[in-house]
Amino acid sequence: MVGRVLGTTLVQVTRSIFLILLPLSFIALIAWATAGSATGNTGDPLRAALWLWLASHQIPFNLVLPPAQLIGHLSYLPLGALVFPVLAIRSGISRTFDRLGHDASLLNLARILFAVEYSIAAVLLAFFSATDSVKPVWYVTPLFVIPLVLATAATVGRRVTFGQALLYGSRAVALLLGIASILLGISIFTHIRTVENLTTVLEPGIIGGFLLLLLNILYIPNAIVAMLGYFSGTGFAVGAATIISPLSFHLNTIPAFPLLGVLPTGKSPLALFGIVLVIFTGALLASWTITLSTRVLIQSVILATILTAFIAYAASGALLTQALSAVGVSPWKLTLSVMSELCLGAFLASYLPRLGRRS
């Protein structure tokens, strides 16, 4: 029985990996052939495809940047790229379940074995794809891959039921991110000329332009989290010793990346109105749970805070050089501000009506 599950999951793990790796290899080979290479080694684009596969799983990299051999780190990776491994993993697990039938014990074992095998494969790919200049941090790979696989596997083969607190807490976070995405869309529309100028400066060409567009799209979720940080009052960074917030603006030179064209050009105290939106979300959260209990409200706020901390951590990090060692929101600042504002909104919605009735 165990051997059957092991063999089935191993085949589907291999399929899930190559479902992403083969298109990435083709894209990397086309880009390598278009840009040219000093070595002419076709192993370079294949290794680059492995790095792209690892980056889509949010695996960080240690770098040694030529020609000065500067030490760098890459952990600010596009959150939008997560959709590709999630879809591949779902496809592999769904096929595994189809072949194993409907035995609950087999399916639970398949989920665990799939996660372990997928993680081992990711560790091996990270270890053997390392070079002197680019070194994936292979030993932290299971910390990123196993939770991703298990969370994806939990949504396959059975109906997912969420507790009330998780349901309402995640709904509040989703509402905040939705508002931030609308504000980001407005900002892109109002700064479209700057975005076009940054694209023109890069002169990417046809293939490079397509890849640049794809990269910008994949980084949009990171920008949405940064927008949430900006309008919640804490702001975000685009490099070491920088801060972009409504009340503070310190910005050095920035990379020529089109999505950065939406950055504000100075302080904007009016943006603090966004705090009211977060407080209103806390009040809305209280209204959703007011017919249940105070315990559900407290649990919802706690889970919303945990989700915010996870998202903030995933949407921040280092980008290649020491000058860009801090990019994105500060995880602890954004988490603390969102938690405080949600609690304030929940408190006002819960206790002000009582005080009014007493008076």
Image (tube, rainbow, N blue to C red):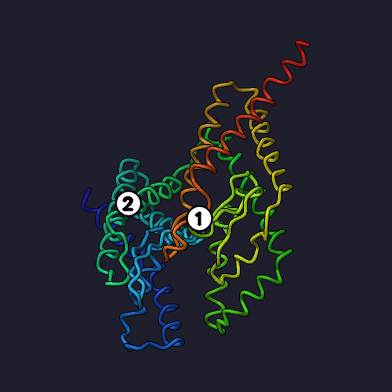
Q: Nearer the viewer, residue 26 or 313?
A: 313
Q: Are marks 1 and 2 in contact (CB under 8 Å)?
A: no
Residue 187: image quadrant is: bottom right
Residue drawn at 28 percent across, 69 percent down: 130
Amino acid at circle 2: Ala
Label 2: element kind: helix
Label 1: element kind: loop
Establish if 220 lies above or below 147.
below
Query: Label 1 crowding class (10 Å Cα cut-off): few <14, some 14-19, many 20+?
Result: few
Dot in front, 1 or 2: 1
Establish if 215 lies above or below 83.
below
Q: Disc number at residue 115?
A: 2
Residue 111 percent location from the top left of the image: 34, 48
Residue 258 percent location from the top left of the image: 60, 70
Residue 102 percent location from the top left of the image: 37, 45
Label whose residue precedes the other's in the sequence (1 or 2): 2
Residue drawn at 62 percent across, 50 percent down: 248
Amino acid at circle 1: Ala
Residue 346 percent location from the top left of the image: 64, 28
Residue drawn at 63 percent across, 80 percent down: 200
**Residue 190 falls left or right of residue 143:** right
**Residue 318 falls left or right of residue 71:** right
Q: Nearer the viewer, residue 132 or 88?
A: 132
CA separation in Å, label 1 and label 2: 39 Å
Query: Label 2 crowding class (10 Å Cα cut-off): few <14, some 14-19, many 20+?
Result: many
**Farthest-out residue, left:** 3
Q: Nearer the viewer, residue 208 or 73?
A: 73
Residue under label 1 = 241
Q: Quadrant of the C terminus?
A: top right
Q: Disc number at residue 203?
A: none
